[in-house]
Amino acid sequence: MACQAQNASRGGAGPRRSPAPAERKRDAERTRERILEAAAAEFAAKGFAGARVAGIAERAGVNQQLISYYFGGKQGLYGELGERWRAAEGSLAAPDLPLDEVVAGYFDAGVAHPEWARMLLWQALGDSPGDERETAQRMEIGADLADVRRRQQAGELASEFPAEFILLVLWAAAMAPVALPQVVRGGYGCEPGSPEFRARYLPPLQRLFRATRAGGAAR
């Protein structure tokens, strides 16, 4: 009787419920997000060459095989991160946004996600993510230049400033807090990601870009 009671007690809980398809999909999406966040942190800390799939898996708390399953490996992860940045950049540099607002968007994105700038800095040191990603980056830069030239033709920017110059200054200004944090601390006396630095750095930077308006002056 005791055995029957035990069996009944164990059986009372019933079989484990299998996750519904929608739940499995959400779990997969959350796992992918964790892997991508871990990959961005690992690439930012060690560069593409120095990053290891094992390190990314450890950061994400997943099995290495899941990285291969979802992304095909380290190269696929880097490419996916690049695509995500490009998608985010599309909203940061929307055609209807004035350039000074674009500057603010790039600055805020750089502070919120410093890993993007650090990955670019690793490339500047010779850390190559591979020919495919470098080709994609050249195409992205070409699209950014086309947008600057469009703004010049529309009269938003003076044509006396080369498009290449404007784009380079924009990127350099947005990356400065991540690339030169020691200069920010020494010059401003605050942290690069602090509200104080934003309040002191961003307004004059925006005025600088407003000064490039065709026939206009900084206000």
Image: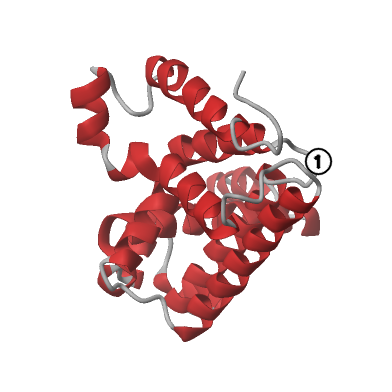
Q: In which image quadrant can residue 105 be found?
A: top right
The answer to whether residue 199 is above or below residue 26 is: above
Q: Foreground residue, 110 or 42?
A: 110
Seen from the viewer's position, the closer of residues 134 and 3 is 134
Q: Toward the viewer: 149 or 119?
A: 149
90 left or right of 9?
right
**Vertical relation: 72 (above or below) 17:** below
Q: Residue farthest to the bottom?
A: 131
Q: Position of residue 128 (x, y in %)?
A: 36, 76
Residue type at mark 1 is Asp
Q: State the scheme by which the image is colored.
A: secondary structure
Q: Is residue 72 above or below residue 107?
A: below
Q: Position of residue 84 (x, y in %)?
A: 61, 58
| Residue 75 position (above or below residue 147) | below
Residue that label 1 marks: 96
x, y (%) of residue 164? 54, 59
Q: Is residue 16 visible?
A: no
215 vs 117, nearest the viewer = 215
The residue carrying pointer 1 sits among few (fewer than 14), some (14 to 19) or many (20 or more) residues within 10 Å by Cα, namely few
Q: Name the residue at 54% across, 44% down.
A: 2
Q: Residue at x 57, y 32 (%)?
A: 104
Residue 80 appears in the rendering = yes
In the image: residue 97, left or right of residue 129: right
Query: Horizontal placement of 153 versus 195: left or right?
Result: right
On the image, the x and y values in percent for residue 198 come to 44, 22
